[in-house]
């Protein structure tokens, strides 16, 4: 069968060829190095980073999986940190068999040893020492591995998630010491920025499943191993402290951590405790378009048209008699455009306590608790303008139908400030018991309870203030697309009150508008148990066991949309001709401004002069101070649209957002691992099977709108003052799957390994898709009515996976690998958007049945994903120099078709070619490492911030990215070291676009970050 790996587009073809050519050249250089470089006798100063010929490799820091060691092994030293210290100041004979590699090269060798010994396809990253992990973020470390790329938070620039072989988010499972972890994010995957990296022992990425661990990840299973006291018997302590600064924020903020571990003299009891405080401050500039909905233009809207223009699709209207008014020209337009500065403070506390009891070689008990709390505070200062397709005139459409130039009359202008807070707290307690019943039989039991909260307590997730001008001060705004989204953002002109650009920020004309407070509250409660028995004898290992977990998710959103309090003082006030709203506002509310000049360096496009800095809490307090509109007449209050408001912007729970999902899953598994020979060649076979049965109960709160009304305060708004009575709705679903797995490893020579792997895995649907009710939220806009419907009967994605790979370990700490993979995935969930009426509600602006864009999901088509991973690691003898390089090329039979404007379009998301290069020097206590990461453009998802179009869910593409990071450290003494880190040295920017490359959605400029710190261990 012929297989193509050229990707879904040809844009990266030349770069791919360049990478392959460069890799070939480097390989030739490496192989041409003198053989003496491998075997020359090390000098005294070289011993820190060298290995004498024949020295045994150190044991891994922790096992690749958490349940493959016996009780005796769990009580033994688990990494090179317990071996003889050969750092500065110690003298060791060159022939000493206990000499081991430490530092960066030592960790790389341990990673290779684990990869080589594994029966499946596994990549590993281990700590160089206690408190010394290669990167300051878990996802940042993982992206150095072949087939792994990352997603970033645009506002922080922090890696928050990973994609493995094109599958991201919920397609990957993350475990803590072999256990699932609760997450309040609203999905199944954790946010990697919430994981403290300082004291992690090891990261393992299992690209082929271990049936005793998990088979519920089509992408990969990531196992994060944390330290335990018997990893390092005796007394150990490590401390780290650093300060970091982002170039635009200009504030140095601290990070610090402390780990203490001790075992008693008899080595029967041990305790470990660590705590880490991390802070990151980031000021990010962003230009955005909230969505590019598709719809139909009328010919009279196009540039060059003259006469009256009344766009309509109503065949019964008088205007429809004129062909120029008929909406029959497909195209796309920007729903909302603006720019903002986001000032983010990210604080995180991570802590762990581990107690181990080891009364004999046969028994090990481990009781541990992991805690994390991330508190993100974000101040946003922005402007925004809103567009409706039917109001656009003088429209120029490019060949793809994108509106690249148009005007809109009576365009209001809004200035916003928001104080956003997000608290994500997670706590997990677990007990693990390992008992060596006989010399061959080990029994293990593991039980854990975890809970995660998003925004616990009375926190307000987002407190917003919106001010501006409109109505009679609206302008005939012009919008122009200036180029591709990776190098330009749109330009607006003729802005300002009534088109007077010189009065853009005239405070005497600015008045109050909408006030939005909203908070998402989630909890995830997880109870799990695993029990298994392992029999080991000679070259045979048998394992059998079972696992049970109950996962309960609760979701609730509350906001001022629900009670319509958001419109309490909307209307901009008297200067705009409004009958509601307060203007002018007190001068002391304004705290300055932010210039938009050269806002995104390196990008073309033009913005208005500035945005205001003001405190949304002070703004809301000012409005509250006007009094109780329900008790007395308050000037500026929006009496025509708001009822029940007593002066404070209290949130109300949206019944349609209430969702409770409970999953119960029972699993049974068995595996056999044995070693034999084929034609005199060593062969390792690992075969397993896992059966998973899931019962799901999903409960939501259903209600439907009774009426839509316009807003006198804002001509773009529609409200829903009345709904039907809330009715609880419960749906049940169950499914069971048999998931086999087989790994074969054939050692063709002592250094050349051939791998063949086949497996079946699954991924469960995203949680918010399981809501059994249709939710129609308040706060609708004219021409942009929307609703969302869930489907509790969704089945999991199912994948048949095949791997074929070869690994050549041609010298110590060096290898070449190639791995071909194929995934046939069925039950893909298709998220379509359809236009439909709901409950007979009439749109008051048209007099017809209201047409809502309803997002719904169903199980749909199959798809094949195929690709190849190339990896190369080279250490140049004892010179201290080396590099890691890898590239991934991926393709699918279901690429995105930008010409398909049906409402149920489908394509595989997340697929992108990628490449990484890490060059390093590590010798004599000095280490420096440069990391280069490249990822091609890819389809991230279906759906944009505004999903109101007529052509289904519009796509979001992430543009190509390339980032350079630099880290360095120096061992001042054997116990004390200093380190530095520079991230995003090349000032990479993150940008996204819609269906076509000139449909900019976002561009984030999150700048560079510099860190300087010190570590101490004893």
Image (cartoon, grey):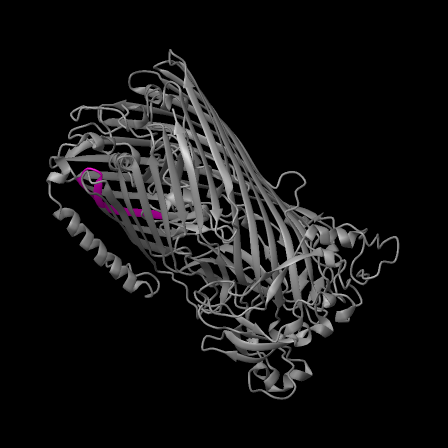
Whether residue 723 is visible here, answered yes or no, is no
Magenta stretch bounds: 800-816
Residue 690 percent location from the top left of the image:
38, 36
Give the prevailing secondary structure in the magenta stretch: strand
Residue 709 percent location from the top left of the image:
74, 65
Residue 532 percent location from the top left of the image:
39, 26
**Quadrant assignment for the N terminus:** bottom left
Quarter occupied by residue 307: bottom right
Up the image or down, 410 lies above or below 611; here it is below
* Magenta-span inclusion, residue 814: yes
Furthest-bottom residue in view? Answer: 307
**Quadrant assignment for the C terminus:** top left
Residue 918 percent location from the top left of the image:
30, 47
- Residue toward you, 745 or 21: 21
Whether residue 194 is visible here, answered yes or no, is yes
Q: Is residue 867 left or right of residue 702?
A: left
Up the image or down, 910 lies above or below 783; here it is above
Q: Residue at x 42, y 29 (%)?
A: 546
Quarter occupied by residue 874: top left
- Residue toward you, 417 or 731: 417
Up the image or down, 253 lies above or below 60; here it is below
* Magenta-span inclusion, residue 482: no
């Amino acid at each position: 069968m012929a297989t193509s790996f050229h990707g879904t587009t040809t844009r990266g073809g030349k770069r791919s060829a360049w990478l392959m050519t460069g890799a070939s050249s480097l390989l030739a250089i490496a192989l041409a190095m003198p053989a003496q470089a491998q075997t020359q006798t090390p000098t005294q100063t070289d011993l820190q980073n060298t290995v004498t010929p024949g020295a045994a490799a150190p044991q891994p820091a922790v096992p690749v999986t958490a349940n493959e060691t016996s009780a005796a092994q769990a009580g033994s030293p688990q990494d090179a940190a317990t071996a003889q210290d050969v750092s500065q100041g110690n003298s060791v004979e060159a022939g000493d068999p206990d000499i081991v590699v430490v530092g960066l090269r030592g960790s790389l060798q341990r990673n290779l040893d684990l990869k080589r010994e594994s029966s499946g396809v596994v990549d590993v990253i281990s700590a160089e020492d206690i408190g010394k992990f290669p990167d300051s973020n878990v996802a940042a470390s993982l992206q150095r591995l072949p087939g792994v790329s990352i997603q970033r938070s645009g506002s922080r620039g922090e890696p928050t998630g990973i994609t493995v072989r094109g599958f991201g988010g919920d397609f990957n499972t993350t475990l803590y010491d072999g256990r699932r972890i609760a997450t309040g994010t609203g999905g199944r995957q954790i946010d990697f920025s919430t994981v403290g990296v300082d004291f992690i022992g090891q990261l393992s990425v299992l690209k082929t499943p271990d049936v005793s661990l998990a088979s519920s990840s089509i992408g990969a299973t990531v196992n994060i191993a944390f330290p335990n006291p018997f990893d390092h018997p005796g007394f150990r302590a490590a401390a780290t402290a650093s300060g970091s600064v982002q170039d635009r924020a200009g504030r140095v903020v601290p990070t610090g951590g402390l780990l203490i571990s001790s075992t008693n003299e008899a080595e029967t009891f041990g305790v470990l405790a660590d705590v880490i405080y991390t802070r990151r401050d980031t000021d990010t500039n962003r230009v955005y378009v909230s969505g590019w909905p598709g719809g139909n233009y009328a010919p009279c809207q196009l540039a060059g048209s003259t006469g009256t223009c009344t766009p309509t699709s109503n065949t019964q209207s008088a205007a429809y008699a004129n062909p120029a008014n008929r909406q029959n020209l497909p195209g796309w337009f920007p729903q909302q455009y603006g720019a903002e500065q986001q000032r983010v403070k990210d604080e995180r506390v991570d802590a762990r306590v581990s107690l181990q009891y080891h009364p004999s070689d046969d028994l090990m008990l481990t009781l541990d608790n992991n805690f994390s709390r991330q508190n993100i505070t974000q101040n946003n200062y922005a402007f925004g303008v809103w567009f409706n397709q039917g109001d656009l005139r003088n429209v120029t459409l490019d060949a793809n139908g994108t509106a690249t130039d148009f005007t809109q009359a009576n365009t209001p202008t809004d200035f916003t400030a928001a104080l956003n807070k997000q608290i994500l707290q997670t706590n997990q307690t677990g007990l693990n018991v390992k008992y060596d019943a006989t010399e061959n039989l080990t029994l293990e039991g593991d039980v854990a309870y975890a809970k995660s909260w998003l925004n616990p307590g009375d926190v307000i997730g987002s407190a917003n203030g919106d001010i501006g001008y409109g109505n009679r001060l609206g302008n005939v705004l012009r919008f122009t697309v200036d180029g591709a989204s990776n190098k330009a953002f749109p330009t607006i002109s003729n802005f300002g009150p009534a088109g007077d650009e010189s009065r853009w920020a005239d405070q005497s004309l600015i008045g109050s508008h909408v006030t939005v407070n909203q908070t998402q509250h989630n909890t995830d409660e997880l109870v799990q148990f695993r029990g298994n028995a392992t029999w080991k004898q000679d070259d045979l290992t048998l394992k059998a066991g079972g696992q049970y977990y109950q996962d309960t998710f609760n979701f609730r959103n509350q906001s001022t949309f629900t009670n319509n309090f958001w419109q309490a003082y909307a209307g901009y006030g008297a200067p705009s001709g409004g009958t509601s709203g307060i203007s002018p506002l007190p001068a002391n509310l304004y705290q300055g401004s932010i210039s938009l000049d050269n806002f995104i360096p390196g990008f073309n496009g033009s913005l208005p002069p500035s945005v205001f800095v003001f405190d949304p809490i002070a703004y809301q307090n000012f409005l509250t101070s006007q009094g109780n509109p329900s008790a007395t007449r308050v000037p500026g209050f929006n009496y025509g649209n708001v009822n029940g408001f007593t002066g404070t912007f209290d949130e109300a729970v949206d019944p349609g957002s209430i969702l409770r999902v409970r999953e119960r899953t029972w699993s049974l598994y068995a595996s056999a691992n044995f070693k034999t020979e084929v034609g005199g060649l060593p062969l390792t076979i690992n075969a397993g099977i896992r059966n998973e049965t899931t019962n799901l109960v999903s409960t939501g709160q259903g209600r439907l709108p009774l009426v839509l009304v316009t807003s006198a305060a804002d001509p773009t708004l529609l409200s829903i003052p009345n709904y039907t009575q809330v009715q609880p709705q419960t749906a049940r679903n169950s499914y069971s799957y048999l998931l086999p797995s087989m790994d074969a490893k054939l050692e063709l020579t002592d250094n050349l390994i051939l791998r063949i792997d086949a497996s079946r895995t699954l991924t469960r649907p995203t949680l918010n898709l399981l809501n059994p009710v249709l939710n129609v939220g308040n706060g609708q806009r004219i021409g942009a009515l929307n609703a969302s419907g869930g489907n509790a009967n969704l089945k999991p994605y199912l994948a048949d996976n095949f791997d074929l790979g070869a690994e050549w370990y041609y010298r110590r700490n060096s290898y070449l690998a190639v791995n071909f993979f194929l995934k046939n995935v069925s039950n893909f969930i298709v998220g379509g958007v359809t236009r439909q009426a709901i409950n007979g509600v009439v749109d008051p602006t048209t007099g017809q049945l209201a047409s809502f864009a309803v997002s719904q999901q169903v199980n749909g088509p199959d798809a094949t994903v195929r690709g190849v991973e190339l990896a190369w690691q080279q250490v140049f003898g004892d010179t201290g120099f080396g590099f890691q390089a890898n590239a991934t090329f991926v393709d699918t039979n279901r690429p995105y078709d930008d010409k398909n404007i049906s409402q149920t379009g489908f394509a595989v998301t997340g697929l992108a070619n990628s490449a990484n290069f890490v060059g390093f020097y590590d010798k004599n206590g000095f280490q420096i490492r440069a990391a280069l990461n490249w990822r091609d453009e890819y389809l991230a998802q279906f759906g944009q911030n505004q999903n109101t179009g007529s052509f289904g869910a519009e796509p979001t593409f992430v543009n190509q990215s390339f980032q350079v990071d630099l880290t360095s450290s120096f061992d001042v003494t054997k116990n004390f070291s200093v380190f530095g880190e520079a991230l995003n040295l090349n000032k990479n920017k993150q940008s996204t676009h819609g269906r076509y490359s000139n449909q900019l959605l976002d561009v984030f400029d999150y700048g560079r970050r510099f860190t300087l710190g010190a570590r101490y261990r004893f």
